[in-house]
Amino acid sequence: MKSSTLVAVLLLQTVMVMGILAHSQPDFPKCCDHCNSWSGAQFCDDVGPKCRDGCVNCRVVQTRPVKTFRCGDGRSAFPYIPCPPPCKKN
């Protein structure tokens, strides 16, 4: 495969993924302790005793000894959108 064809395919895949992320997760947590960003996407990957307000993709990751939830929300980072601030500790 020629390098120009490979670049075109990768570019189209990136655009497709960004479009999916932009439309599938319109809500994003207002704060996030573990925000990761790569390839033009941001992911809030917080784990705790409950999901934070604004988390759309909340899953139980542990049931014993304490029930633990993970917020796995993602969004497009184009144009550059900084990660939300860390959550305040109570």
Image: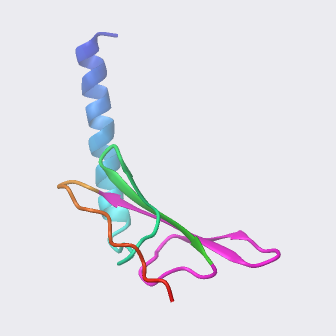
**Picture layout, residue 88 above or below residue 56:** below
Count of all numbered marks drawn on residues in the image? 0
On screen, 27 above or below 34? below
Check the image and tell me how it is coloured. Answer: rainbow
Task: Establish if 88 lies above or below 18.
Answer: below
- Residue at the far top: name it: 2
Residue at the extreme bottom of the image, as rendered = 90
Q: Residue at x 64, y 81 (%)?
A: 49
Viewer-proximal residue among 35 and 19: 35
Residue 64's x, y, as percent? 82, 74
Residue 66 is a magenta residue: yes
Residue 28 appears in which quarter of the rendering? Answer: bottom left
Find residue 63 and report its image quarter.
bottom right
Asked if residue 69 lies in the magenta stretch, the reply is yes
Q: Quadrant of the N terminus?
A: top left
Looking at the image, which residue sits at the far left?
Answer: 79
How far across and how far down the image is residue 59, in percent?
61, 70
Highlighted range, magenta: 49-76
- Residue at screen point 27% across, 35% down: 12
> Quadrant of residue 10 in the image?
top left
What residue is drawn where x is 27% and y is 13%? 3
Residue 65, image x, y percentages: 82, 76
Q: Is residue 85 left or right of residue 59?
A: left
| Spot occupied by residue 85 in the image (x, y as percentages of width and height) | 33, 72
Left or right of 51, for residue 18: left
**Residue 28 vs residue 8, the one in the foreground:** 28
Give the residue furthest to the front.
89
